[in-house]
Amino acid sequence: MTAEQRAKKIKVLIFDVDGVLTDGQIFVLPDANGRGIEAKGFAAHDGLGISLARLGGLRIGIITKRQSQTVAIRANDLKLEFIYQGQSHKMNAINEILAKAGITIDELAYVGDDVIDLPVMRACGLAIATANARPQAKAVAHYTTPNPGGRGAGRDAVDFILTAQGTLEKVIEQYLDESNSAAAAADVGTGNM
């Protein structure tokens, strides 16, 4: 089965965070109490892609090993449905998502970049590796994004799925229609979090 054939079945799209929705760098800034404040950079293209995905009928989420207030704030701004932090074994979260969404594993796409993502990538319907992914992740991927994590890889994944489903251009036009209330509801936040 081709990657495009797999993409046609997708109903839920799940992203890893570090190295996928970010470039993998973690900035730690000291606060006045000597504790660290974590900062990460996210790509605006990925945020708009999530709006398009939602408008196209996909349900979206993240699973990450780290616990991060920065990720919680960004996930809220993106209006993600499934948010799992602190997940050392990501298949546990995947099984919960499958039950909540009422789908089978072949209807789930996952975007990963490193060995922690392998169990999910080996099991899901559409495994997507980022351009910057480790060789082990690329080896099991059905599709590899042209852009690296934190630089539009999330948007690449969305565009690939919606193109395979034949809805990308329609969804873009719906998004651009300022009178479309569904587009406004699907859109991500406007910052000032």
Image (cartoon, rainbow, N blue to C red):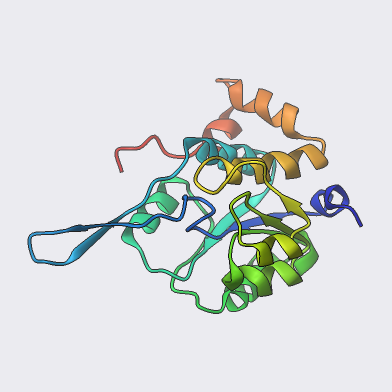
Q: In this view, does 78 lie above or below 100?
A: above
Residue in front for this viewpoint, 79 or 21:
21
Quadrant holding the N terminus: bottom right
How many marks can you see? 0
x, y (%) of residue 107?
77, 60
**In the current view of this chain or complex, which residue is farthest to the left?**
32
Measured as percent of width and height from the top left, residue 165 is found at 81, 42
Q: Give residue 180's position: percent from left, percent from top.
A: 60, 25
Q: Nearer the viewer, residue 172 or 26?
A: 26
Q: Can residue 104 be seen in this view?
A: no
In the displayed orientation, state which residue is furthest to the right.
1
- Residue drawn at x 50%, y 78% is 88
60 relative position to 102: left or right: left
Q: Which of 93 and 118 is in front in this view?
A: 118
Would residue 96 be visible to someone looking at this image? yes
x, y (%) of residue 110? 66, 60
* Residue 104 picture quarter: bottom right
Q: Is residue 146 left or right of residue 90?
A: right
Q: Residue at x 62, y 37 (%)?
A: 52
Say above or below: 11 vs 191.
below
Q: Residue furthest front?
A: 135
1 on left or right of 80: right
Q: In this view, does 99 lie above or below 42?
A: below
Residue at (54% x, 56% y) in the render = 81
Quarter containing the C terminus: top left
